[in-house]
Image: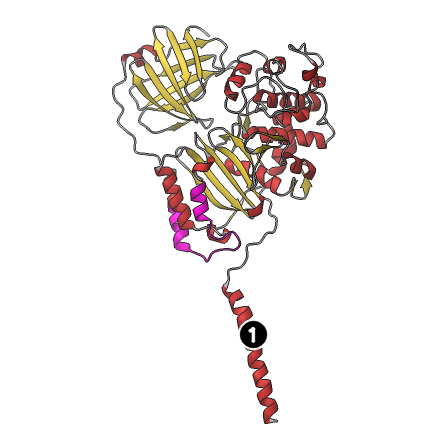
Amino acid sequence: MRARTMVVGIVCLAILAMLAVVLIPRLLQPEPVSTEVYWPTEGWRKSTPEEQGFDSSKLAEGLVAIQEQNIKIDSLLIIRHGSVLLDAYFYPYDGKVAHDLASVTKSVMTTLIGIAVDQGELQLDQPMLSFFPDRTIANLDDRKQHITVRHLASMVNGFESGSLRGDEPTLRAMRANADWVQSALDRKMVREPGTVFCYDSPGMHLLSAILEETTGMTAVDFAHQNLFEPLGIRDVVWDSDPQGITRGWGDLHLKPSDAAKIGYLWLNNGVWEGEQIVSAAWVEDSVTAQSRSGGDDYGYGWWVSKESYYAFGRDGQNIKVMPSLNAIVVTTGGGFEYDEIVPFLTAALVDPNKPLPPNPQAVATLEATLAALVQAPAPQPVGPLPDTAEAISGKTYVFGPNPAEVETLSLEFDDSAEAMLHIKRPGSDEAVAWPIGLDGVYRRSADGQWLRGSWADPETFVFEIGQNTYRLHFVDDRLEVSSPELGLVFEGQIGTP
């Protein structure tokens, strides 16, 4: 009996030892992050960076370094496993208004084409010219007749275009015409469709015109009904051309948190709250190489690399989707490259496979850093205004057709630290009024524009708006307007609108 008791005791001790080896390490590990699909229709849920494998201290250090290095970023949003772990904004942008997404718009435009294909409204291999039977089109040849919707969506249309580095002149040439769609259609052909990648914004505008021809709805209205409303995206600005056709290549404005929903839709194969918004087949094809650019590949409106696919716009607009990490990174900016911030993100991602131990002190430091990033600088003294300011104050300058689409412009100066800019667009009933800070502090207009300015010399007033700088040079009754970033130069003179 004594021997049997000893044996039982030894067995029990062995079992306890084994349980200790197996269970204790598991009990000490943090709980794994749930991978349950969450739908942020009414807003994103949040988590600490540590819950997603990121170090809050490293993120805070990175954000400070980004600001100190004057990297021209407006916002940085990181989402993992459906939760926001970082939502950073840099003065003057505070995320409260929609941001210009530039050519990220192209990814949304092709998404709408995909939805229309799913609905049977059009087909990818339909000839482009079949949608414009009533137009007389210049430079018509067999190559132009062979252009399809697919060719436009994958940037292999064969039109004469400046490609990625020179796309702005091509775009300006289109916008200098009264009818942008006609201008895009009339261009010369330089290669067989489907053979060579060439980044082409006017081709994307043609997709918007095609969508309107087939659905009877502008692209922005079609988007509201079929994409934005189902995803809970309500704060949208998306301008149109002189004929009212939504700009298919750019100028869509969304909040970063709403732009991230597009990436999340793609992560979930086109499904949102159980509804197939865009087919899984389209999602897969859109981020599969349809053409080779010489760098990253191009799908239907999306760029494709080994580790990710992404929607990209000039000056730092990005929706980057990384399926292997179940992560989305959204950036907006005023002139930076995504690679400039990658080292800071890489340093902060400590363990992509499991959460880190909680670190409340580091989280508090990060929150304090985020609050500091959006603080305005102290106002600076405003010096005496030049005589030109008094001479031109309240005068209206009238412009002919120009790429900036300015019909009239006037400035008002007084003795305060703020000027007022009035701009009227062609077709608008009245001018918009934008305050301009003269004390080094941006002023925000009612429609969400941020402006500040100063006199560069007695005849030249320079102001910043969003991502661009404009120089107003006054000589007698004439005004020359230029923008180095946009390559714009046009003139107006004092007159009656």
Q: Is residue 39 visible?
A: yes
As drawn, 420 above or below 223: above
* Residue named by callout 1: 18
Q: Is residue 494 left or right of residue 242?
A: left
- The answer to whether 427 appears left or right of 491 in the picture is right
Q: Which residues are magenta?
A: 342-368
The quarter of the image holding the N terminus is bottom right
Image quarter of residue 444: top left
Snapshot quadrant of residue 462: top left
Residue at 37% over, 12% down: 394
Q: Secondary structure at mark 1?
A: helix
Residue 161 appears at what percent x and percent y? 56, 19
Assess whether residue 360 is covered by the magenta stretch. yes
Number of marks in picture: 1
Residue 116: x percent and y percent? 69, 29
Q: Please name the amino acid that badge 1 sits on.
A: Met
Q: Nearer the viewer, residue 379 or 472?
A: 472
**How far across and how far down the image is residue 99, in percent?**
49, 31
Q: How is the image coloured?
A: secondary structure
